[in-house]
Image: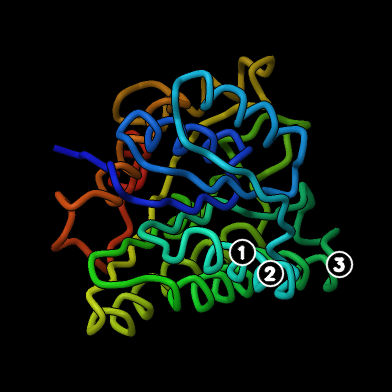
Amino acid sequence: MFDLKGKLALVVGAAGYLGSDVCRGFAECGAEIIAADWNQQGLEVLAETLKAQGAAVRCECLDCADPAQTAGLMDSVKNTEGAIDVLVNAVYYRTSKGVDELAEEEFTKANKVNITAAFSLLQQASQLMGPGASVILFSSMYGSIAPNPGDYPEGTAVNPIEYGAGKAGVNQLVRYAAAWLGSRQIRVNAIAPGAFPWNVTDNEEFLRRLRAKSMLGRVGRQHEISGAAVFLASDEASFVTGQVLSVDGGVSAW
């Protein structure tokens, strides 16, 4: 089960904390990977790691907020690999500002990355996808629930409004696109991670509060995201579409 041999996966946001683990999981299951990210140095480190494990991977530097760059990547894929079997979009943008400090142009910039670029990537990549292909977008638990300010110790920025608004948009994009692409037998789903902290490991009080929110009494670990992605990419999920799969330790089920 969960054999991805013979599948080409385009992972956008591949150098990120969770995107890199998706690439690892895909590689372990035999997929060929195109890893795309704006972070050239991060891509190089990722490629070195995956190739050392015997994976077939090529890297593309991409600012997905620039539709011309996305179009250029699609032309490259069309001319080199021909078709995409799996698309993953793990890109997001957020500030660390509260509502009162957030400028309108910053909210607009976040929407451009979190919603508009996600739509553009999906629209363009779907032209290179055929029956049985899978699209996996990244949402968040904050696409369906609001962050509780009481979970954030004094001096810790609350998860910002533009992030949750964008992820709620992703949830609807998944449902709409699943209906749109269903007749072509292309599946569209999302993964909604909970707390997978990577930059607050020295904030023990914040981590304590995050653990308390989970039914499992802990936060997510990096390697725990790839299983959901591998499942949704695989033929074992061939009748799963239009869904937002929570990987949040039960936080959103309270």
User: Which is closer to the viewer, label 2 or label 3?
Assistant: 2
Task: Judge whether 198 appears above or below 87 on screen.
Answer: above
- Mark 3 is on which residue type? Ala
| Residue 82 placement (x, y as % from top left) | 45, 65
**Secondary structure type for disc 2:** helix
| Residue under the image location 30 percent in, 24 percent down | 216
| Residue under the image location 28 percent in, 42 percent down | 5
User: Which is closer to the viewer, label 1 or label 2?
Assistant: 1
| Residue under the image location 56 percent in, 35 percent down | 151
| Residue 30 placement (x, y as % from top left) | 32, 35
Quadrant of image for the N terminus: top left
**Secondary structure type for disc 1:** helix
- The local crowd at label 1, few if under 14, some if 14 to 19, many if 20 or more residues have their Cα within 10 Å, is few
- Mark 1 is on which residue type? Ser
Q: Which residue is mark 2?
A: 72
In depth, the one of 172 and 88 nearer the eye is 88
Query: How far, Cα to Cα, is label 2 from label 3?
Result: 32 Å
- The local crowd at label 2, few if under 14, some if 14 to 19, many if 20 or more residues have their Cα within 10 Å, is few
| Quadrant of the image occupied by residue 74 | bottom right
Query: How far, Cα to Cα, is label 1 from label 2?
Result: 6 Å
Q: Is residue 179 left or right of residue 78?
A: left
Q: Which residue is mark 3?
A: 103
In depth, the one of 94 and 203 nearer the eye is 94
Q: Which residue is mark 1?
A: 76
| Residue 221 placement (x, y as % from top left) | 44, 23
| Residue 6 placement (x, y as % from top left) | 30, 47
Task: Judge whether 218 appears above or below 7 on screen.
Answer: above
Precedes in sequence: disc 2 or disc 3? 2
Precedes in sequence: disc 3 or disc 1? 1
Task: Judge whether 123 appears above or below 155 on screen.
Answer: below
**Secondary structure type for disc 3:** loop
